[in-house]
């Protein structure tokens, strides 16, 4: 039957609980680290000097103007195992949060049993049950609820929800890293094709010069040394072409793996056609909004929030807690009167728990959670500093690359003019084949340098988009 408690008794019990709770001392345990406000970090002259632009769009790679690249990134987002692993972790974190939420809600259980047993003649069972066999039937519904007076369960739930946000931000970080890796590999593939064209062109020119030199040697206008000098350059050029063919095959395999396919799919990747028009700048709201744009920063910020809730939950463990359990059901010997009202049972059990002397266990738990919070804060600060470093370094490289492009264009124009003059002089018999070959090698080198500068420009663009968060707007506390 339902047990009633007198108000005076309840008040006395509560007072005793509050007094005894004071025996569990938290000590002087508190966080020592503080998050850095982004605006307190000086962005530097490189960031200040950058041209203003909007934040990247979500599909930032489309600015490179290659439809095949767009398809590769879309395929990777749909099929990449690494992204699916990150998404599974999000679902796992959501399930854990669901478990934590259940602790904040009432719980109801039902049970039923039917037990046939022989009761002892000298036990507690009265006649006629004593020294006889009988059925003991029970059906009970039990409800329990933790009052969570100090919010421990709710703090644990908040921490679990924050961990869900961490997993979500890490999934976005994995996606951005995948997009960036595909872009970098694709740009390297473009560069390898450019170098291969230059090497093939050089080989063609050397073979043409060799043919002319042989004919001049047959006519007595060139020496055998001239012929040998040209011939010795051909194997090196062919070796370089073979190395580039290998690089192209490896990059195709790498791209296929990044999109979650086999090497056979890499063989279908055709030559890239990349174009990037216009100058690239920075958003004027940097670095203030960078925290909400980079998924790695968002993940670290949510970790700090989760660690803060874990501290509050650890503090709540120092205080008393009350759990109420109530039950109602039926119990009888035999089946004839099992469903009668006289067979009903019910009751309520308030359970009080409070720490008094625990050998320092609670203080150890609070200290561990506080240290975890400090570590999360410092990790966040380090990630923020690294984010600004990546942006500043990439902008510096892009500014230098623009100057290098201008110088490369000038050098390439000069080399082309020198090669043209040497070729005309050779045809006219004024100079020998060695002069033409030297001019051609100089032109080849400048063409390769121009391609390298352009590759760095494209690569810097991909790095900047990654440093800015790739256009993904993250939620923050």
Image (cartoon, rainbow, N blue to C red):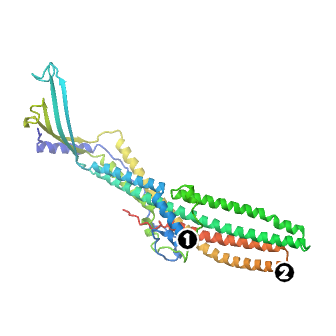
Label 2 neighbourhood size at 10 Å, few (<14), some (14-19), many (20+)? few
| In the rendered image, the vertical position of residue 235 relative to residue 366, given as above or below | below
Residue 328 in sight from this viewpoint: yes
Label 1 neighbourhood size at 10 Å, few (<14), some (14-19), many (20+)? many
Tell me the residue at 82%/79% (across/down): 427
Residue holding disc 1: 395
**Quadrant hosting residue 213:** bottom right
Q: CA distance from mark 1 to mark 2?
A: 50 Å
Drawn side of residue 305 relative to residue 13, left or right: right
Q: Position of residue 3 (x, y in %)?
A: 12, 39
Task: Choose mark 1 or mark 2, whichever is in front.
Answer: 2
User: Is residue 119 or residue 226 the one in the foreground?
Assistant: 226
Tell me the residue at 67%/77% (across/down): 409
Tell me the residue at 57%/56% (across/down): 263
Q: Position of residue 318 (x, y in %)?
A: 30, 46
Label 1 secondary element: helix
Residue 428, numbered label: 2
| In the rendered image, the vertical position of residue 100 relative to residue 137, given as above or below | below
Of pointers 1 and 2, the one earlier in the residue sequence: 1
Label 2 secondary element: loop
Residue 209, numbered label: none
Drawn side of residue 54 relative to residue 123, left or right: right
Tell me the residue at 48%/61% (across/down): 75
User: Is residue 419 or residue 71 the one in the foreground?
Assistant: 71
């Amino acid at each position: 039957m339902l047990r009633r408690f007198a108000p005076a008794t309840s008040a006395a019990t509560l007072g005793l609980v509050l007094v005894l709770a004071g025996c569990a001392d938290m000590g002087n345990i508190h966080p020592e680290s503080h998050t850095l406000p982004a605006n307190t970090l000086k962005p530097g002259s490189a960031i200040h000097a950058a041209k203003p632009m909007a934040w990247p769009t979500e599909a930032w790679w489309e600015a490179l103007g290659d439809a095949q690249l767009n398809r590769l990134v879309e395929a990777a987002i749909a099929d990449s195992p690494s992204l699916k692993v990150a998404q599974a972790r999000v679902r796992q974190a959501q399930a854990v949060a669901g478990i934590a939420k259940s602790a904040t809600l009432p719980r109801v259980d039902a049970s039923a049993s039917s037990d046939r047993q022989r009761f002892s003649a000298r036990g507690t069972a009265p006649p006629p049950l004593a020294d006889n066999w009988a059925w003991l039937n029970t059906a009970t519904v039990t409800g329990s609820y933790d009052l969570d007076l100090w919010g421990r369960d709710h703090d644990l739930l908040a921490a679990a929800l924050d961990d869900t946000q961490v997993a979500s931000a890490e999934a976005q970080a994995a996606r951005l890293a995948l997009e960036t890796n595909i872009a970098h590999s694709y740009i390297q593939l473009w560069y390898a094709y450019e170098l291969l064209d230059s090497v093939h062109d050089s080989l063609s020119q050397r073979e043409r010069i060799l043919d002319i030199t042989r004919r001049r040697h047959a006519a007595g206008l060139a020496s055998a040394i001239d012929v040998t000098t040209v011939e010795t350059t051909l194997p090196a050029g062919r070796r370089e072409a073979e190395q580039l063919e290998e690089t192209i095959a490896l990059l195709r395999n790498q791209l296929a793996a990044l999109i979650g396919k086999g090497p056979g799919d890499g063989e279908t990747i055709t030559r890239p056609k990349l174009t990037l028009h216009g100058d690239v700048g920075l958003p004027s709201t940097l670095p203030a909004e960078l925290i909400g744009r980079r998924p790695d920063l968002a993940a670290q910020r949510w970790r700090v929030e989760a660690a803060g809730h874990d501290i509050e939950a650890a503090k709540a463990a120092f205080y008393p807690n009350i759990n109420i359990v109530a039950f109602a059901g039926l119990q009888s010997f035999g089946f004839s009167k099992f469903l009668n009202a006289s067979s009903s049972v019910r009751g309520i059990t308030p359970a009080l728990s409070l720490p008094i002397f625990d050998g320092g266990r609670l203080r150890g738990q609070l200290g561990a959670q506080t240290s975890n919070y400090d570590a999360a804060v410092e990790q966040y600060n380090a990630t923020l500093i690294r984010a600004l470093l990546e942006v500043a370094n990439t902008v510096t490289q892009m500014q230098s690359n623009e100057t290098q492009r201008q110088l490369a264009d000038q050098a390439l124009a000069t080399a082309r003019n020198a090669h043209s003059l040497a070729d005309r002089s050779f045809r006219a018999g004024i100079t020998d084949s060695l002069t033409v070959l030297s001019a051609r090698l100089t032109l080849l080198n400048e063409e390769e340098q121009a391609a390298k500068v352009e590759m760095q420009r494209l690569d810097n663009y991909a790095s900047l988009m990654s440093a800015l968060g790739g256009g993904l707007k993250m939620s923050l506390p």
